[in-house]
Image (spheres, coloured by chain):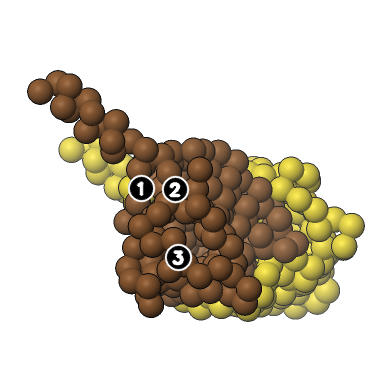
Chain colours: A brown, B yellow
Amino acid sequence: MKTALFVSLLALFPLAANAEYEKVDMTVFGMDCAPCAHAIHVSMKGITGVDNVDVDLNTGLVSIQLTPGNVATMHQFNEAVERNGFTHKDAKIVAKGRITGTASAPVLEVTGTEDKYALAASAGAPNAASFLGKTVTVTGVLPQVAKGKIPDALRYAAITEAQ
Amino acid sequence: MKICFAFAAAFLLCATARASDHGPVFSYATPVNSQGEFSFDSGVFGRYGSTGTQLSTGSQIGYGITPQLTFTAFVPATFGSGSLPETRIFPGGEWSAAASWRFLHSVTQVGKRIEATGTAGLVVPGPQTDSGILGQLARAPGLTSNMAAGVASRSHYFWIGGGYTWFPERNGSRRPDTVSWSTVYGYRPPKLRRGLDQWDYRGLLELTGEHTGDVRVHNALVPDSRSTSLWLGPAVLAIFKDVAIEAGVQGPLHRDVSTSVYGREIVRFALNFSYLKYSSRASAH
């Protein structure tokens, strides 16, 4: 019984380890001063799995580096912005996940989380359908959405099979 | 039970009309706390005139209930014996507690926001008596409200605001109702638009004004106790991450004040220190 449980855990762990946000670059509107940037920095660092945060006041860019195996979600990143009274715009992400859905409507499931995005290819991007069922690393842009929501679709520029 | 009552009273009896933490030092402004953020302010505020000097020290605590709603409480102490007119825009000897609601919040581009905030609160006389004509009054708690609107960006800041404080009559005495207003312009030069790990400076020019009504003592209006004045002066704000230091000085631009009642107020100055304690609490997914 113990062996079976151990084998089950081993089978589950690689999924979690390969399913995560690696990097999130969010554009945030409304930050005009150092305390604004500090507030965002503190809030983002409070999310489990966030390794490093850089905030550039002049471009509004918040760059978040995450640790391997994290289970942080887009909802948490967006909420960290909203709690401080700012507005999140587009976010460029690098994430690992599994391609599910159908050949005509591929979906990226960031399976360490409940985040799912319908995939739409940018010009020159490979066909996501050819990665169906595989674990991949995707680079793309999530569009701005209303407060409290997360985007439905990810416009990806690159997709590669994860090692 | 007594402790609960004391705590509730301390929370309720206290409000501020003054801009808090990293805004202008004399004027009304729109910033409110982040959700879960505590702000702590402590400052020295002085008024110097021909009848003496009045110094106030004040400590203010603020807490962001939501990103748009902040509660503040202000506890002052006053020193000196200047017989100066009532003022509400400048900290005096009253305890106050207030709620500020940012009802307009529009972000249009990186580093820029347009917003408006309304504040309502209660003003309660502190344990120290006023000096001069105001020291003769039986003081009653009053109600205060103010509104501020403006734009903040990486380079320019502009806010306008106005407030009104009303006091009821007590034992034949009545403190003057006060109308206050302010305009402030701020600028941060390109060289000082720096990153998170460096000091951030902003220069401000603050114009404030107040009109105080008649003072009533022993059921009689005190002659020439109304006052109207305009004040103008520079201020500097320096911020590093979660610490802000503000200092400013103002001189009179216009005075319609009886010198026989209040003397001649010549200068106002303020030095304020702020600490901002942001919340790092994140939701669980």
x and y percentages locating residue B188 in the rendered image: 82, 63
* Distance from the alpha carbon under mark 3 to that under mark 2: 21 Å
- Establish if A150 lies above or below B283: below
Q: At 72% from the left edge and 74% from the top edge, which residue is drawn?
A: B158
Quadrant location, the N terminus of chain B: top left
Q: Which image quadrant is residue A156 in?
A: bottom right
Q: Which mark is residue A140?
A: none
Q: Amino acid at mark 3?
A: Ser
Q: Is residue B217 visible?
A: no
Q: Of the two numbered discs 3 and 2 on the same chain, state the one appearing first in sequence.
A: 2
* Distance from the alpha carbon under mark 3 to that under mark 1: 22 Å
Q: Which mark is residue A20?
A: 2
Q: Amino acid at mark 2?
A: Glu
Q: At 45% from the left edge and 65% from the top edge, which residue is drawn?
A: A130
- Tell which residue pokes out farthest to the top in this image: A2
Chain ID at mark 1: A
Q: Which mark is residue A130?
A: 3
Along the line of sight, the residue nearer the viewer: B156 or B83: B156
Q: Secondary structure at mark 2?
A: strand
Tell me the mark number nearer the camera, choosing from 3 and 2.
3
Along the line of sight, the residue nearer the viewer: B187 or B27: B187
Left or right: A113, with A36 as reference point: left
Q: Are marks 2 and 1 in contact (CB under 8 Å)?
A: yes
Chain ID at mark 3: A
Q: Are marks 3 and 1 in contact (CB under 8 Å)?
A: no
Left or right: B117, with B54 as reference point: left
Q: Amino acid at mark 1?
A: Gly
Q: Which mark is residue A112?
A: 1
Chain ID at mark 2: A
